[in-house]
């Protein structure tokens, strides 16, 4: 569907949404007893992870976030101005995590504040549009920006080729996979419209972060996203490997 008269006004929600939360009477998974969780610096809400969505304008960053957090799709969204922010709670692999997901503007003129949002991110989702080769060509400069501004050397990065539902594909899956392999990125293709791959993408990213203790255990002790770098977090040996997803 074409978006006539400009794209729809974007909702800028800043609410906390509780998805997949255990009900009041539900037991914490046996693999993650309360005392052990406390020792890891987690409270009842679990561990907070900071994730960031980056990529060229109109590749579908906000749509992926909307699909993931609200299960919805808007055919005509207005461009993000500055940054949007949403929180989602989920249980991954028996671990309760709270995701603070920052959705940055793709348009250059709205990006003045963006570098400060990279700080402390444990995971970055780098999005391109499989129907626009230019957004794939722009990935290198996004990776350069990530290198410049992320404060953690072992931040988990995932490459996402979005809009697979559209027929006019310009970037083959194989190309995305090769690029991801070369740059040691996780990789998946998605459609925010049909929801194909969206949940899987975020889950795999979180799993990879959880497999990288130096990335999140210190941060949890310092209340999630407001952290300073420590020597442990600088450990380059962790989580820099390429991991095919599908
Ligand atoms: N067909 C299809 N359209 C999509 C998909 N994802 C996003 N769109 C559409 O593409 C347009 C741009 O999507 P956005 O989510 O606003 O893109 P963005 O990357 O957040 O854009 P900026 O805010 O400018 O950075 C919107 O009209 C969406 O409805 C998808 O998977 N399939």
Image (cartoon, rainbow, N blue to C red):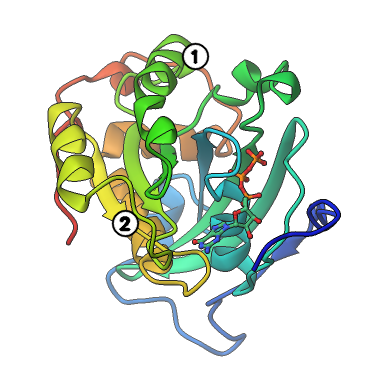
Badge 1 element: helix
- Return the x and y of residue 168 as percentages of the image width and height: 39, 57
Q: How many residues crowd mark 2 within 10 Å: few (<14), some (14–19), many (20+)?
A: many
> Which residue occupies the foreground of this view, 238 or 223?
238
- Return the x and y of residue 91 as percentages of the image width and height: 43, 69
Work out whether 86 lies above or below 109.
Answer: below
Q: Which residue is mark 1?
A: 149
Work out whether 76 lies above or below 1.
Answer: above
Which is nearer the N-term, disc 1 or disc 2? 1
The CA distance from mark 1 to mark 2 is 25 Å
Q: In the picture provided, is 204 more to the left or to the right than 64? A: left
Q: Residue at x 18, y 41 (%)?
A: 175
User: Image quarter for residue 190?
Assistant: bottom left
Q: Residue at x 47, y 75 (%)?
A: 194
Q: Quadrant of the C terminus?
A: bottom left
Work out whether 158 lies above or below 71.
Answer: above
> Which residue occupies the foreground of this view, 148 or 225?
148
Residue furthest to the top: 148
User: Image quarter for residue 117?
Assistant: top right
Q: In the picture provided, is 46 more to the left or to the right than 40? A: right
Q: Which residue is mark 2?
A: 189
- Return the x and y of residue 6 as percentages of the image width and height: 82, 51
Q: Quadrant of the N terminus?
A: bottom right
Q: Is residue 43 visible in the rendered structure shown here? A: no
């Amino acid at each position: 569907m074409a978006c006539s008269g400009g794209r729809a006004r974007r909702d800028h929600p800043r609410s906390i949404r509780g998805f997949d939360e255990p009900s009041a009477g539900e037991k914490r998974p046996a693999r993650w007893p309360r005392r052990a969780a406390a020792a890891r610096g987690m409270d009842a809400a679990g561990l907070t992870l900071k994730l960031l969505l980056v990529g060229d304008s109109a590749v579908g960053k906000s749509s992926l976030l909307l699909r993931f957090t609200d299960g919805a799709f808007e055919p005509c969204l207005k461009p993000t101005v500055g940054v949007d922010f949403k929180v989602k709670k989920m249980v991954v692999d028996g671990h309760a995590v709270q995701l603070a997901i920052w959705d940055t503007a793709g348009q250059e003129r709205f990006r003045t504040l963006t570098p400060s949002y990279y700080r402390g991110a444990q995971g970055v989702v780098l999005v391109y549009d499989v129907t626009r080769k230019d957004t794939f060509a722009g990935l290198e400069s996004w990776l350069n920006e990530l290198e410049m501004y992320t404060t953690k050397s072992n931040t988990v990065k995932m490459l996402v080729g979005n809009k697979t539902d559209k027929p006019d594909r310009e970037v083959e899956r194989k190309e995305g996979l090769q690029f991801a392999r070369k740059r040691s990125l996780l990789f998946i293709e998605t459609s925010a419209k049909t929801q194909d791959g969206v949940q899987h993408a975020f889950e795999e990213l979180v799993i990879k972060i959880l497999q990288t203790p130096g990335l999140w255990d210190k941060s949890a002790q310092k209340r999630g996203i407001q952290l300073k770098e420590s020597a442990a977090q600088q450990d380059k040996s962790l989580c820099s490997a390429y991991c095919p997803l599908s």
